[in-house]
Image (cartoon, grey):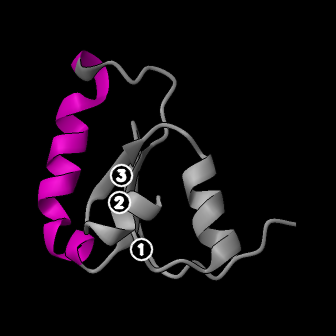
Amino acid sequence: MAYASANDYVVLTHDLDFSAILAATHGEKPCVVQIRAEDVSPDVIGLQVIAAVRQMASELENSDLLNVDPNRTRMRLLPLNWSLD
C-alpha cells in the first residue's frame, strides 16, 4: 500500500483487507479496484473490470475505491468514513 501510494499506482485486488486498511487509516491513497466475485478468472470477470476502470478512469486518478462485482460497480470516495466495528 505504501509503495502504491508513493508512486501513484492503482491496486487491483480480490482481497478485502485493502479496503479495511484504507478505512482504519483514513487513507486517501492509493486508489483500489476491488473485485468482489467468487470467480475472478479473466474469462468471467475480466471484461467487466476493464469496462469499470475505463468508465471510472478520472475518478481513479483522484484516489477512490472501486468495487466491481458481477451485478454492479460501485465507487467510494477516499478517505472512507465507516468503522470496522
Q: Identify the element where label 1 is drawn.
A: loop
Q: Which residues are the magenta region?
A: 43-61
Mark positioned earlier in the residue sequence (2 or 1): 2
Residue of label 3 = 11
Dot 2 and dot 3 residues touching (CB under 8 Å) = yes
How many marks the image carries: the answer is: 3
Q: Main secondary structure of the magenta part?
A: helix
Label 3 crowd bin: few (<14), some (14–19), many (20+), radius 10 Å: some
Between 74 and 78, the one lying in front of the other is 78
Residue 82 appears left or right of 10: right
Residue of label 1 = 29
| For residue 74, above or below residue 70 | below
Q: CA distance from mark 2 to mark 1?
A: 8 Å
Q: Residue at x 39, y 36 (%)?
A: 70
Residue of label 2 = 4
Residue 28 covered by magenta stretch: no
Q: Residue at x 60, y 46 (%)?
A: 16
| For residue 6, above or below residue 70 | below
Residue 74 visible in the displayed image: no
